[in-house]
Every structure is written in C-alpha cells, then in structure tokens.
Image (cartoon, grey):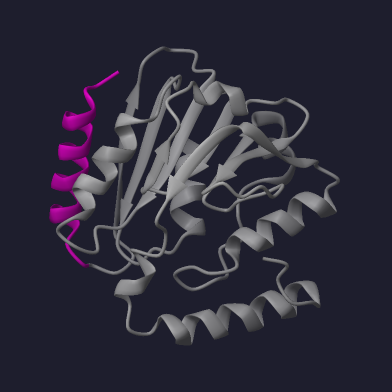
Amino acid sequence: MEHVHELAAAVDRIAKDIGQVEGAYRICHVRRREDPHLSVVIPYMQVDEGKPQVLEDTLKTVEGVDEIIVVVNWKLGYAKPINIGLQAATGEFLLVMNDDMIWDGGSLKRLCDAAAVTSPQVNGKVQPFWGCAFCIPRAVYEKVGGLHEGYRISYFDDADYYNTLAKAAVPTRCVEAVEVHTEGGRTLERFPDRNEFFEENRRHFIERWGKEPEF
C-alpha cells in the first residue's frame, strides 16, 4: 500500500485544491490487492492546519486493510461522502471510520463478521454501534444501502443508519477485543452554526422515525 505519509500528503493537496467550495469533493484511493477483503472509507474535511497530521496519525494505526478510500470534501456532510466512498469500495467488508481514530495496533480484520455490522470499543466504552467506526459486510450494504443524506453537515445520520439496520433486522454488535481512541468533535466544532444544524437534524430524525435519537 502507498506509504502513509504519501497518502496523507496527497489528501492535503486535494483539500487545498478544493479549498472551501461548498459541496466540492474528490476521492483519494489506494489499493494493495485486486480483490480486497477489507476496505476502509474515511470522510475528510480539512477544517484547520492540523488536520493533515491528525489523518496521518490515524493512517499509521490502520492495520490489516486492503483498500483505503478518503473522500476529501468541504461541507458535503457526513452521509454523502461516506456513500461516495462505499460506492467506490470493492472489499467484502466495508469499514467506515472518522479521520481521527487511533487504533490498538491489531488487524482491523477482527471487525469482519458476515453475520453482523460491528463496531470496536471506543474510548473504553462498549455499545452495539458507533457512528465513528462501523464495519459492514458487503451483503448487508447491498441489502440496505448507504446512509440517508437528508441531514445537513452532520449529527444523527449515524443514529439514522442504526435504525435502518434495526428495521432490516441486521444485527449490530461490539467487538470488544478491538479498541480505538478518538478525541472527537474537532471538525464540527469549527462550524459556528453547529447548534443550528444540530437542532435542524434532530427535528428531521424525529420526522423520519417518530422518536428521539437513541444516541
């Protein structure tokens, strides 16, 4: 696979080329083998000068993957760049993850389970689904599709997908042997209107599902 530093540098160049043109995106795609088992999809917005290093630190801990797709974008949201990445991915398992995750050093293939959508422990906490890191079997992706794109920027699109999986009777579970650490919030904290689209998205979630988000 392309060297981590070279991949992070390529993403940085793409982000600078895009600038802050709302809705703009480009894909940075590297593959180690022609028939990938595990593909990783990372949505990425370069909200400050420190983000390239954050991404590089993340990539250094990503082990056991065969394909990495980084969808560089500006205000495309959370769901849409993930869906773009999922459509481009060719692996039998599709790991969606944020760009600021520090993994435990083991192979991420430990998350691959043909019978369920899985998530790791996040900051020592266990729950059946984490929007910041979840692994989808291709058969499940082909059954339920990607994330709903009706939310602005982010917030609650992951909870929406969790409900979509539950509605389709797809099991979700935590693989407690896999751990990841994340500070979280770095990207969204840079948007002055975050409270506005938080409430807008919350209302949209309730309209779709008739209840408050579970997480």
Q: Nearer the viewer, residue 49 or 21?
A: 49
Taken as a whole, is the magenta stretch helix, strand or loop?
A: helix
Q: Nearer the viewer, residue 118 or 138?
A: 118
Q: Which segment did they paint magenta?
A: 1-20
Image coords of residue 200 (percent x, y): 56, 84
Image coords of residue 45 (percent x, y): 30, 58
The structure residue drawn at horizontal position 17% and vertical position 46%, both measured from the top left corner, is 12
Quarter of the rendering containing residue 112: top right
Q: Can see residue 90?
A: no
Up/down of 180 relative to 25, above or below: above
Image coords of residue 129 (percent x, y): 67, 49
Quarter of the rendering containing residue 57: top left
The structure residue drawn at horizontal position 46% and vertical position 85%, both measured from the top left corner, is 195
Image coords of residue 176 (percent x, y): 65, 35
Up/down of 63 relative to 11, above or below: above
The structure residue drawn at horizontal position 30% and vertical position 73%, both measured from the top left corner, is 190
Quadrant position of the N terminus in the picture:
top left
Up/down of 62 relative to 122, above or below: above
